[in-house]
Amino acid sequence: MIIKYLIIHCSATRADKPFSTEALIATGMARFGQVSYHYYIRRDGTVVPTLPEDVRGVHAKGYNSCSLGICYEGGLDTQGHPADTRTEAQKASMLALLQKLMAKYPTARIIGHNELPNVAKACPCFMASKYYAALSLTPQRSSCDF
């Protein structure tokens, strides 16, 4: 599998309610019959590998065959509205993970789920391509599923 994109997601859960790794996995299994994301970043900054990188995820229609999905716990404020709820620990862990992945996949582009064509979601509730622009070398955008 050629990795062209590192796609950032949020779990779309409230910042004041924990959403366990087990709950994330169960949600993917119920909706798609498999785990959706490759990595899950908990509020405390713990990075949990949830799917091997060589296994296709189910997190971004039209991009699953050439991307890794990275999901952070949260994405909704305490009233349930979309918001960048990443903790400082999550920001630090996500940066470290992305640096590691960019070393492994140097031509990959970091992008938020909401930045993909025909996506009408706020996820991940911030502009990932802008936030991590210094890490990305490849500016193109094209579908990779045929």
Image: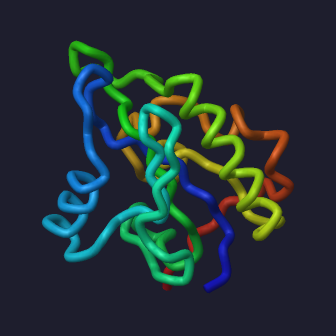
The residue located at (69%, 41%) in the rendering is: 95
Quadrant of image for the N terminus: bottom right
The residue located at (22%, 21%) in the rendering is: 80
Q: Is residue 110 toward the left or the right of residue 63 in the image?
A: right
The one of 72 and 110 positioned closer to us in this rendering = 72
**Location of residue 145 with respect to 87 vertically, above or below:** below
Q: Is residue 90 toward the left or the right of residue 135 in the image?
A: left
**Location of residue 94 with respect to 54 vertically, above or below:** above
Q: Residue 128 location, x and y as percent?
A: 62, 38
The residue located at (71%, 61%) in the rendering is: 101
The one of 42 and 69 positioned closer to us in this rendering = 42
Quarter of the view holding residue 112: top right
Q: Is residue 95 toward the left or the right of residue 48 in the image?
A: right
The one of 146 and 40 positioned closer to us in this rendering = 40
The residue located at (42%, 62%) in the rendering is: 37
Q: Residue 30 location, x and y as percent?
A: 13, 66
Q: Residue furthest top?
A: 79
The color scheme shown is rainbow
Count of marks overlaid on the render: 0
Q: Is residue 18 toward the left or the right of residue 109 in the image?
A: left
Q: Residue 125 location, x and y as percent?
A: 46, 30
Quarter of the view holding residue 126: top right
Q: Residue 58 location, x and y as percent?
A: 37, 69
**Location of residue 94 with respect to 143 vertically, above or below:** above
